[in-house]
Image (cartoon, helix red, strand yellow):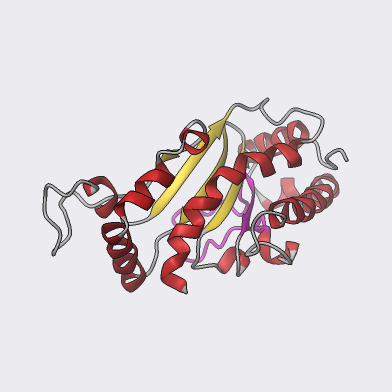
């Protein structure tokens, strides 16, 4: 099965939106946006099904809970641009509101990426994640050093400058103990998903994140 949406057309529209981010411009082109949004949602529905074949936490997720709206919440933002200039979705238990490990795809002109892990966990969850890594260093190291993962993904997580209390400064996994979130990212070129079936390609690219998600999910058992 081929993809419903054309990533090139989506990126072209988003680039124009970036240069004309106002309500009048968007309203005049709402039909064009809808013509891009609907096949994108069908593709995400299919992506959920494909990822659900190897990750039970994604199986059954509803598209409406996965896909982000294009409208920005500008109430507390200095940037009053009314629209996001990207298409994105989260695949995880709980969808966009998940606190558990999840997959994220972000398609924006000049910034196409896939991500996985846990975004900004609550303080108590972060403490448990650090304790888990400290308690299971061999399992964690084996997972994050797997060539299938490292060939695609790199760590892009905010970290403390110093080791947190109760951990030695020379800890063998200090890089990970200091992290404030656990995010790995795969950046791709604009034409990477210019293929017959970009949805199937994304599903394949997300799969190496599954063991990491399984490990991080221990704290939610």
Q: Is residue 4 left or right of residue 134?
A: right
Residue 125 location, x and y as percent?
36, 70
Numbered disc total: 0
**Which quadrant of the figure has residue 49?**
bottom right
Residue 112 location, x and y as percent?
59, 36
**Which quadrant of the figure has residue 167?**
bottom left
Residue 141 appears in view? yes
In this orientation, which residue lies closer to the viewer: 178 or 79? 178
Residue at the outermost left position: 169
Q: Is residue 200 left or right of residue 178?
A: right
In the image, residue 172 above or below residue 165? above
In the image, residue 144 above or below residue 164? above
Residue 192 location, x and y as percent?
66, 27
Give the main secondary structure of the magenta stretch.
loop
In this orientation, which residue lies closer to the viewer: 1 or 145? 145
In this orientation, which residue lies closer to the viewer: 152 or 161? 152
Magenta range is 67-91
In the image, residue 12 above or below residue 107? above
Quarter of the rendering occupied by the N terminus? top right
**Which residue is at 63% across, 52% downward?**
83
**Which residue is at 86% across, 47% downward?**
35
């Amino acid at each position: 099965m081929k993809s419903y949406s054309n990533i090139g057309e989506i990126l072209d529209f988003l680039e124009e939106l970036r240069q004309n981010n106002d309500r009048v411009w968007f309203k005049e082109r709402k039909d064009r946006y809808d013509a891009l949004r609907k096949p994108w949602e069908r593709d995400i529905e299919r992506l959920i099904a494909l990822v659900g074949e190897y990750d039970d936490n994604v199986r059954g997720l509803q598209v409406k809970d996965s896909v982000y709206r294009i409208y920005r919440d500008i109430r507390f933002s200095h940037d009053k641009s009314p629209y996001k200039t990207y298409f994105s979705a989260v695949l995880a238990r709980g969808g966009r509101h998940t606190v558990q490990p999840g997959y994220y795809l972000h398609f924006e002109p000049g910034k196409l990426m896939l991500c996985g892990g846990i975004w900004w966990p609550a303080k108590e969850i972060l403490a448990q994640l650090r304790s888990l890594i400290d308690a299971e260093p061999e399992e964690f190291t084996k997972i994050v050093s797997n060539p299938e993962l490292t060939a695609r993904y790199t760590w892009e997580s905010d970290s403390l400058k110093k080791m947190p209390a109760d951990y030695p400064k020379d800890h063998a996994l200090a890089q990970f103990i200091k992290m404030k979130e656990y995010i790995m990212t795969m950046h791709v070129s604009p034409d990477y998903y210019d293929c017959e079936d970009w949805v199937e390609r994304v599903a394949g690219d997300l799969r190496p994140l599954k063991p990491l998600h399984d490990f991080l999910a221990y704290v939610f058992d």
